[in-house]
């Protein structure tokens, strides 16, 4: 029987000296994740379309005593991805953690009679292709450093079945399966997993949430509240940290134990 190796609790979550990239990290779940990783000691690079917001988030991060870097980046542009990785390496000298959080699409508006294949293609470019490419760019640096963890933000839509969601939901389902396969390509040095948020109080949800919709969602949610960005960040920290050192290729749904959809 393998001898149990005792580690201090803090050591299991300690990211001191490590560098994390968080795409879409200027606001919402991305920002909450960046702050949580910074609290664990990681230096943070935020890659985001909104450079001013990213710079503001970095100020909060640096107040925690770690180094920060804001980079303007469009994940749909390969040159931006390459330049961003080069800039992070130049600034920090290593890349250990990649949070592929940026994404998007037309979920809830994808009536197949009214959209084109270009709309569906964009879902996959945002949610699948960009993260795959960024992982490809970062993994060699992770392997060189001896520590690597990649986490994708997926979605409950990847397992739910709803109308007007085929492209977005299909792309997120692809993320889940892609992660499971890439675990075999990137291991043993680099782990890769995904976090699927349930209904989380972000600016995007606020645009459609009504008291009636929230009540309906909570009727199907054992933990009787909607998620907060920090709830999702906790799962991101788990996957990024040494405590999950034997976990790869997995998708965990952080959803209060239930299912929340807009048409309940």
Image (cartoon, rainbow, N blue to C red):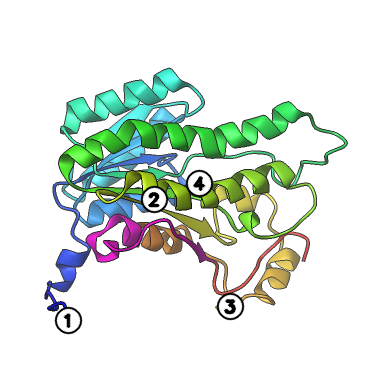
Disc 1: which residue: 1
Q: Residues within 10 Å of mark 1 (few under 14, many from 20)?
A: few
Residue 41 vertical position relative to residue 261 in the rendered view, above or below: above
Q: Quadrant of residue 209?
A: bottom right
First reached walking from the N terminus: tag 4 or tag 3: 4
From the viewer's perspective, tell me whether residue 177 is left or right of residue 81: right
The numbered dot on residue 167 is none
Residue at left offset 34%, top offset 62% = 247
First reached walking from the N terminus: tag 2 or tag 3: 2
Q: How many marks?
A: 4
From the viewer's perspective, tell me whether residue 175 is left or right of residue 262: left
Which residues, given as a range, are shown in magenta? 237-254
Mark 1 → mark 4, Cα distance in angstroms = 34 Å
Secondary-structure class at tag 4: helix
Residue 18 vertical position relative to residue 140 in the rendered view, above or below: below
Q: Nearer the viewer, mark 2 or mark 3?
A: 2
Q: Residues within 10 Å of mark 4 (few under 14, many from 20)?
A: some
Residue at left offset 62%, top offset 53% = 205
Disc 2: which residue: 183
In the image, 142 versus 71, the foreground residue is 142
Mark 4 → mark 3, Cα distance in angstroms = 32 Å
Q: Position of residue 263 (x, y in %)?
A: 78, 61
Residue at left offset 46%, top offset 49% = 181
Secondary-structure class at tag 3: loop
Q: Position of residue 41 (x, y in %)?
A: 19, 53
Q: Nearer the viewer, mark 4 or mark 3?
A: 4
Q: Quadrant of residue 144?
A: top left
Disc 3: which residue: 224
Q: Nearer the viewer, mark 2 or mark 1?
A: 1
């Amino acid at each position: 029987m393998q001898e149990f190796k005792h580690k201090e609790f803090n050591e299991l979550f300690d990211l001191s000296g490590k560098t994390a990239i968080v795409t879409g990290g200027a606001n919402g779940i991305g920002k909450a994740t960046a702050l949580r990783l910074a609290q664990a000691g990681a230096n943070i690079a935020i890659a985001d379309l909104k450079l001013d917001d990213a710079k503001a988030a970095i100020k909060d991060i640096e107040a925690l005593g770690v180094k920060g870097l804001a980079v303007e980046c469009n994940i749909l542009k390969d040159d931006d991805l390459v330049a961003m990785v080069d800039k992070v390496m130049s600034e920090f000298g290593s890349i250990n953690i990649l949070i592929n959080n940026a994404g998007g699409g037309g979920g809830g508006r994808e009536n197949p009679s009214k959209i084109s294949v270009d709309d569906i293609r964009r879902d996959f470019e945002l949610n699948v292709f960009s993260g795959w490419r960024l992982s490809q760019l970062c993994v060699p640096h992770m392997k060189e450093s001896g520590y690597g963890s990649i986490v994708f933000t997926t979605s409950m839509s990847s397992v739910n079945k709803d109308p007007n969601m085929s492209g977005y939901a299909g792309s997120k389902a692809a993320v889940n399966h892609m992660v499971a396969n890439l675990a075999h390509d990137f291991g043993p040095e680099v782990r890769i997993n995904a976090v699927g948020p349930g209904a989380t109080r972000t600016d995007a949800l606020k645009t459609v949430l009504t008291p009636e919709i929230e009540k309906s969602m909570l009727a199907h949610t054992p933990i009787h509240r909607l998620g907060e960005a920090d709830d999702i960040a906790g799962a991101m920290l788990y996957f990024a940290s040494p405590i999950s050192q034997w976990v790869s290729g997995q998708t965990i749904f952080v959803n209060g134990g239930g299912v929340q959809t807009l048409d309940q």
